[in-house]
Image (cartoon, rainbow, N blue to C red):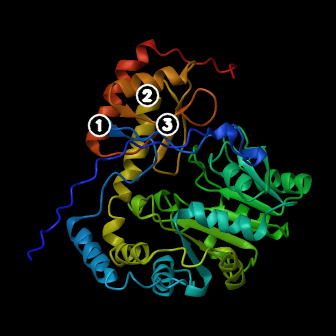
Amino acid sequence: MTQRRRTTQPRPMAKPQPNPIQLADLPLRPELVGEEPYGAPQLDVPVCLNVNENPYPPSESVRKDMAKAVSNAGKGLNRYPDREATGLREDLARYIGFGVSSDQIWPANGSNEVMTHILQAFGGPGRTLLTFTPTYSMYPEYARNTHTEYVTRPRNASYGLTTDEIVSAIEEVKPDVVLLTTPNNPTGTTIPVAVIDEVCSATDAIIVVDEAYQEFTDTPEDSAIALLPKHGRLIVVRTLSKAFALAGGRLGYAVAAPAVVDALRIVRLPYHLSEVSQVVARVALAHAPEMLARVDELRETRANLEDWLRAHGLDVVSSQSNFVLFGRFADRHAVFRALLDHGVLVREVGPTGYLRVCAGTPRETDAFRAALLDVLPTARRLDPEED
């Protein structure tokens, strides 16, 4: 008897029916109620100059090496990655210099995760983080997410900080962790290494120096990393997202005493850094001169932008990064929207009246200049005494 083969008919696609529960109905932690997820606008526009990326992607040869490394890693993706990222830490130590060894390096998924590890280890309930505003808008979220009290004091009129200003704030607040950003985001201003040295000598607090944009400064070798042999409670945080043109790779790292790294290892999730992330970062580091080849150009672009903006009557904060803070506009959101209507995305951030733009390619920079020239005639400026 011949059996008839049953044919399987495709099942009709069921219409999704998600549960109608609302965010307000969930038992959120009290400090999360009403909060919005962090994120700069990600819009499909011709010119994106809002998140301080290196506008030049890795070269074709680097991309091929990355693809080969990922393909090779794929043979072992059924296994967990090296949870200590041993090879990557060795490569980072060689890149950093300063006599740093691999046991002084701690990599993670962007400097965001590194900062979270630091506060998980040294912050937490009953402990305080002190930093100085205006500064990076993610810092209060790191503190909130680790139940660390977040306390700020203002930077001075030039958006810099002196030893006396920092130490005075430390004596007043008595923080467990002090976060110093140099170059600072969004102002681009720096804190001299000599000041950091004096601050470290004046306190027992953990001092975290965020050097995410250090490679863009006029003197990138003038780093707080040089102070690590002298100060055991100093942590320097860096990233491959900015100058290294690897924002999509999500790789940041801390440089500190081996004991500090051990503390961060305690709080990290197991196998936190994927094998793909590790091998891509190692390829980038193997091509470090090529990955950083455009940094001098971007530094010059930023300096020229400062001069151009000042020549058109705008207030500009002198920057040592790849971005410029400019204004001051009576309605900065209107200027932001007008630039966006011209296909140029900048960042609405920082002190009252200011916008931030990062250095782009020549085409992108020209487009920004043309758009701003079209917008400026109708953009009212703030008077010096207006806040």
Earlier in the chain: of badge 3 and badge 2, it is 2
Camera-nearest residue between 21 and 172: 21
Q: Is residue 101 visible?
A: no
Earlier in the chain: of badge 1 and badge 2, it is 1
Going by the image, does 169 lie left or right of 340?
Answer: right
* Residue type, numbered disc 2: Ala
Q: Residues within 10 Å of mark 3 (few under 14, many from 20)?
A: many
Earlier in the chain: of badge 1 and badge 3, it is 1
View extreme (left): residue: 2
Going by the image, does 123 lie left or right of 194?
Answer: right
Q: Is residue 118 visible?
A: yes
* Residue type, numbered disc 1: Pro
Judge depth for marks 1 and 2 and give the one in front: 1
Picture residue at 73% right of the left edge, 42% below the top: 156
- Is the Cβ of the residue at disc 1 closer than 8 Å to that at disc 2? no
Q: CA distance from mark 3 to mark 2?
A: 21 Å
* Residue type, numbered disc 3: Arg
Residue 330's spot in the image, x, y percent? 58, 18
The quarter in which the C terminus is drawn is top right
Q: CA distance from mark 1 to mark 2?
A: 26 Å
Judge depth for marks 3 and 2 and give the one in front: 3
Report which residue position mark 3 lands on. 347
Camera-nearest residue between 252 and 373: 252
Label 1 element class: loop
Picture residue at 56% right of the left edge, 63% below the top: 111
Report which residue position mark 1 lands on. 46
Q: CA distance from mark 1 to mark 3?
A: 15 Å
Residue 85's spot in the image, x, y percent? 50, 83
Going by the image, does 94 lie left or right of 255?
Answer: left
